[in-house]
Amino acid sequence: QLIQSGGGLAQAGGSLKLTCADSGAGFSIRAMGWYRQAPGKEREVVAAISRSGRQTSYADSVKGRFTVSRDNAAYTMYLQMNSLKPEDTAVYYCAAVFHPEAEAVVTSSQTYHYWGQGTQVTVSS
């Protein structure tokens, strides 16, 4: 079970941090990712991180502004969002899947098995 927190309202140029907490069982062997879905648009990958935390991947639209990280000891993944833009407004979801490779990054939404409940991020101009 993935429980999300954080998000909310921010002004353009501001920052927000999202947290995704796992129940604990098997967290360290799950590749994880962040997705978002804006009204009228398809869900898109924002960032992904390997089991080890050493490998990451970002959508071009957030590179240099967002940082994904994880703390396997705390069973938690984070998404630090800086320099926010109005186009970042969306519902954000975290996702997880068991993966045999410690350094693999998963970016396909169809591969993920577990999803958080979603959290709204709204950026005003």
Image (tube, helix red, strand yellow):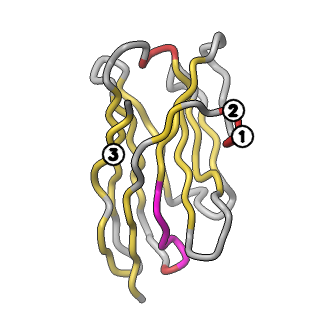
Question: Which residue is label 1 attached to?
Answer: 108
Q: Residue furthest top?
A: 100
Residue that appears at 66% across and 71% down: 41
Relative horizontal placement of residue 57, taking residue 53 as reference (left or right): right
Quadrant hosting residue 36? bottom right
Find the distance from the CA under tag 3 to the CA under tag 2: 20 Å
Tell me the residue at 34%/80% (across/down): 11
Q: Distance between the residues labelled 1 and 2?
A: 6 Å
Magenta-highlighted residues: 87-92
Q: Are marks 3 and 2 in contact (CB under 8 Å)?
A: no
| Circle 2 residue | 111
On the image, the x and y values in percent for residue 39 come to: 56, 75
Whether the residues at callouts 1 and 2 have beta carbons within 8 Å, the answer is yes
Residue 37 is left or right of residue 19, and the answer is right
Q: Mark 3 points at which residue?
A: 4
Quarter that holds the N terminus: top left
Residue type, numbered disc 3: Gln
Q: Where is residue 8 in the image (x, y as percent from the top left)?
A: 30, 67
Say few, some or many: other residues with alpha carbon within 10 Å of mark 1 (under 14 / 14 to 19 / 20 or more): few
Which amino acid does the dot numbered 1 rest on?
Ser
SS for callout 2: helix
Q: Where is residue 91 in the image (x, y as percent from the top left)?
A: 46, 63
What mark, if any, has residue 19 been given in the picture?
none
- Density class for disc 3 (Cα within 10 Å; few <14, some 14-19, many ≥20) is many
Q: Considering the numbered disc 1 on the image, is that residue within a helix, a strand or a loop?
A: loop
In this view, 38 is above or below 102? below
| Residues at marks 3 and 1 touching, judged by CB atoms closer than 8 Å | no
Q: How many marks?
A: 3
Q: Nearer the viewer, residue 54 or 108?
A: 108
